[in-house]
Image (cartoon, helix red, strand yellow):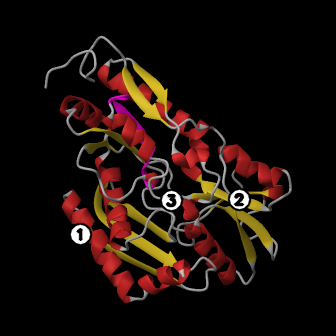
Amino acid sequence: MKSGPDRPGGLDRPLRLGTRRSKLAMSQSGHVAEAVRRLTGRAVELVEVTTYGDVSREHLAQIGGTGVFVTALRDALLRGEVDFAVHSLKDLPTAQPSDLVLAAVPRREDPRDVLVARDGLTFEQLPDGARVGTGSPRRMAQLNAYARVLGKRIETVAIRGNVDTRIGYVHAGELDAVVLASAGLRRIGRSDEVTDFLAVDHVLPAPGQGALAIECAADHADLAALLAGLDDPHTRIAVTAERSLLAALEAGCSAPVGALADLLADGQIVNEMRLRGVVGTTDGSALVQLSTTGPVPQSYDEAMALGRELADEMLAKGAAGLMGERAS
């Protein structure tokens, strides 16, 4: 492919990185831009793109969830307005368009959810009837189920907004706590707000949570090859299994589905992967939670097969009925 001033291979202009405008998106895109500069020696400029998810005030479950933070960035890629884009991987639909390529999945941040609560409270210390804010049906399902295990009741409150807005509900006394992704708080330097890290034994994260996706046009093979230098194979294998499970359950990111693939090591050698999945009703009254452990997949096809197999087991245990109950 011939390089020129309008192609990413052209050396006479910076690479254009498409990013959402939020503080979190700008921060994580800034980290990727610096990594690309170090890797390639090329200048990188951030190009801010407004997505439907950024301007809509409806709850994510109402506007479909999947793709609402992604479509505008992908359109900018295909129009040639940006050379590559950075997404939170959990925002990506599970079906990859043929005209775009997932060039890199960098090393994952902490995938756990965290609590930001008044008075430094942990989840177990929250009073009966505590109001806990989250925009995620997945979190609602597992938080309510966790509270039941502890013998108490919480009220999960649907909220939207950026990190500052959500934490502001706690500081203003409108909510007792909010639940956020650890990775997001770390990336914007707000980890000191965390009052409790929610163990994945109680709250599984969204598939791909904590990971970033670097995407470019499929016909920019030279750029895709450069960006591949940022790919972390262990992270890619793990999130491939998680997203395959999600796809097999026919659920978008707004559905109450959690998944996490852990790579398990014997000393310094990573030799096993454990994949866990959960589906539940948002009130926490019913969950289907299963796991499988086996050798680390040696290909993305094997990782996808593992996700499908666990999804089939979950469907056989009644997962489809729980999702149907949510939607009815």
Quarter of the image with the C terminus is bottom right
User: Of label 3 and label 1, which has the lower sequence position?
Assistant: 3
Left or right, 199 with respect to 73, comes to right
On the image, the x and y values in percent for residue 68 come to 49, 52
The crowding category of the residue bearing disc 3, from other C-alpha atoms within 10 Å (few below 14, some 14 to 19, many at least 20), is: some
Q: Is residue 15 left or right of residue 137?
A: left
Name the residue that disc number 3 marks.
65
Measured as percent of width and height from the top left, residue 78 is found at 31, 37
What element does badge 2 sit on? strand
Give the label, 3 or 1, closer to the camera: 3
x 27%, y 43%: residue = 100
Verify whether residue 21 appears in magenta.
no
Q: How many labels sit on residues?
A: 3
Name the kind of residue labelled 1 in the image: Ala
Q: Is residue 89 found inside the magenta-colored segment of the image?
A: yes
Label 1 element class? helix
Residue 305 numbered tag? 1
- 29 to 272, vertically: above or below: above
Q: Which residues are magenta?
A: 80-90
Label 2 amino acid?
A: Val
Question: Which residue is rendered at x = 75% and y = 81% of the image?
Answer: 152
Q: Nearer the viewer, residue 291 or 316?
A: 316
Q: Which residue is mark 2?
A: 178
Does the rendering let one see residue 296? no
Residue at 50% in and 69% down: 255
- Where residue 276 appears, x then y in whole percent? 41, 71
Give amino acid for label 3: Gly
Evaluate if marks 1 and 2 touch, with contact meaning CB atoms under 8 Å apart: no
Q: Is residue 218 left or right of residue 138?
A: left
